């Protein structure tokens, strides 16, 4: 019985740490601009890793006792899935920002090379 209680507490602690990590990451994402396309690549990679973690958390909801979190397994699973979904959207958006930035800078470099050869 004591082992079960320790396991529940560790699950609650893990979720708390995951929520803090999610919030810190979303603050980092909120500061992303299209000019910072190199950072967008890192954000997209981190979003994908965190999305994978949140889909695992959703799956854990069916195995864990979430009553200590004052919710049902269904509601907890939906909540975790919303985090996963948001992170997946961040991944997609960050990849677009990175890709567009890369294309823009390649075109600038090409225009600069052409200009130099015509001088």
Image: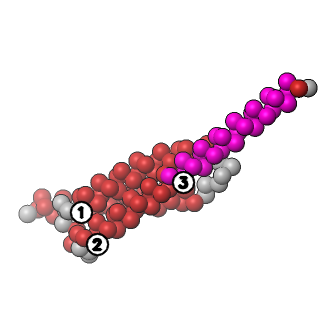
Report the mark closest to the observer, 3 or 1.
Answer: 3
Residue 24: percent from left, percent from top: 49, 58
- Mark 2 highlights which residue? 75
The outermost residue toward the top is 117
The circle on residue 50 is none
Considering the numbered disc 1 on the image, is that residue within a helix, a strand or a loop? loop
- Mark 3 highlights which residue? 93
- At x 79%, y 34%, the residue is 111
On screen, residue 12 versus residue 90, left or right, reads: left
Q: Which residues are magenta?
A: 92-117
Q: CA distance from mark 1 to mark 2?
A: 9 Å
Residue 35: percent from left, percent from top: 68, 49
**Residue 79's image quarter?**
bottom left
The circle on residue 61 is 1
Residue 12: percent from left, percent from top: 27, 63
Considering the numbered disc 2 on the image, is that residue within a helix, a strand or a loop? helix
- Residue 24 appears in view: no
Relative to residue 117, is residue 51 depicted above or below?
Answer: below
Relative to residue 14, is residue 105 depicted above or below?
Answer: above
- At x 59%, y 45%, the residue is 98
The outermost residue toward the right is 119
Give the mark nearer the N terminus: 3 vs 2.
2
Give the mark nearer the N terminus: 3 vs 1.
1
Considering the numbered disc 3 on the image, is that residue within a helix, a strand or a loop? helix
Tell me the crowding category of disc 3: few under 14, some 14 to 19, or many 20 or more residues within 10 angstroms, Cα based. Answer: some
Tell me the crowding category of disc 2: few under 14, some 14 to 19, or many 20 or more residues within 10 angstroms, Cα based. Answer: few
- At x 36%, y 50%, the residue is 52
């Amino acid at each position: 019985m004591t082992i079960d209680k320790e396991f529940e507490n560790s699950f609650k602690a893990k979720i708390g740490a995951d929520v803090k990590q999610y919030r810190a990451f979303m603050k980092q994402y909120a500061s992303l601009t299209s000019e910072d396309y190199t950072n967008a690549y890192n954000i997209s990679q981190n979003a994908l890793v965190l999305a994978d973690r949140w889909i695992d958390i959703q799956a854990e909801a069916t195995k864990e006792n979430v009553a200590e979190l004052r919710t049902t397994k269904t509601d907890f699973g939906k909540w975790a899935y919303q985090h996963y979904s948001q992170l997946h959207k961040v991944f997609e958006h960050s990849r677009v920002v990175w890709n567009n930035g890369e294309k823009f800078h390649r075109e600038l470099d090409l225009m600069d090379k052409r200009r130099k050869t015509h001088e």
